[in-house]
Amino acid sequence: MNTTRPLAIRKRRSSQCGFTLVELMISILIGLFLVGGLLTLTSAMKRTSGSQTGLSNLQENERMAMTLMTDVIQSAGYYPNPTVSSAATALPVTGVFTFGGQSVYGTGAFNAASPFDSITVRYRTGGTAANDNTINCTGNTSAAATTYVNVFSWDPTTGDLLCSLNGATAVHIASGLTQLQIYYGVQTNVTTTATSIDGYLDAAAVTAGSYWGNVISVKVYLTFTNPLYRTTAGTVVAGQPATIQFIRVINIMNKAGVNT
């Protein structure tokens, strides 16, 4: 008897052969490695994007805060027309300002239990034929004669830098702050005519020494949360501090004398 199977039957059975269990397991393992690598890459890209966004927000908040505070503080004591009025008449005694011409006042003490520093700055603007473009802490100007009283403060609950203009509800300036510290460059030696600073004092020391009329410059410390301190997974990034501090010394224009 001829036991040779027809060629067509042998080809059909050969085409029906599949993968073995070992081959399937190897394929699944390779797929898991590929998926794991893709998830790791995606997670790393997400962390990098989050860090870049955090740094961008930090730079924007720092720039906004320092620019507004600088523009306002350096204008302290300004009034448009010194030929028809004096500092005492343009900026009379009112509120926290205890003598005519006083343009800066602050609160806060170094090493205090709750150092919620604030600074109050006033000046006059407008009242001339053209707008003198002196801005307030909201970024606005006025062509009409106006006295601006700007109060910068920090809200520890939200971490916001705030500014209240002329007693109005405080508005948001910047976010992400963990502390606001302000020191005042004071000339305590009043016997000299030179415009020189003897040292930087906190607001409590300036009040105790009655030096508000002798403030020449203001040193501002803005401390922000570091967006790189922790990753999205909550692990500490090596070498990154919890906060980043920015410092700027701002001269009061009508007190600093000639600058080159």
Image (cartoon, grey):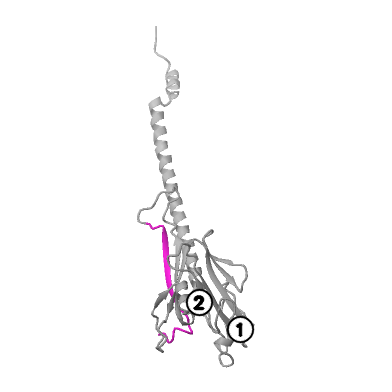
**Residue 192, relative to residue 23: is it above or below?**
below
Q: Looking at the image, how many numbered discs can be counted on the residues?
A: 2
Region of the chain picked out in magenta, as a range: 240-260
In space, the residues marked 2 and 1 are separated at their CA atoms by 18 Å
**Residue 83, relative to residue 175: is it above or below?**
below
Badges 2 and 1: C-beta atoms under 8 Å apart? no
Q: Position of residue 217 (x, y in %)?
A: 44, 78
Asked whether 16 or 175 is in front, the reply is 175
Instruction: Name the residue located 39 percent from the left edge and 51 percent from the top edge.
Output: 236
Q: Which mark is residue 73?
A: 2
Q: Position of residue 108 (x, y in %)?
A: 48, 69
Q: Which residue is mark 1?
A: 126
Q: Which mark is residue 146?
A: none
Question: Residue 20: in sight, yes or no?
Answer: no
Q: Amino acid at mark 1?
A: Gly
34 to the left or right of 61: left
Looking at the image, tell me whether mark 2 or mark 1 is earlier in sequence order.
Answer: 2
**Residue 162, relative to residue 25: is it above or below?**
below
Helix, strand or loop under label 1: loop
- The mark closer to the camera, 2 or 1, is 2
Asked whether 130 or 216 is in front, the reply is 216
Q: Position of residue 41 (x, y in %)?
A: 42, 47
Look at the image and say whether residue 85 sits in the magenta stretch. no
Q: Amino acid at mark 2?
A: Ile
The quadrant where residue 97 appears: bottom right
Question: Residue 62: in sight, yes or no?
Answer: yes
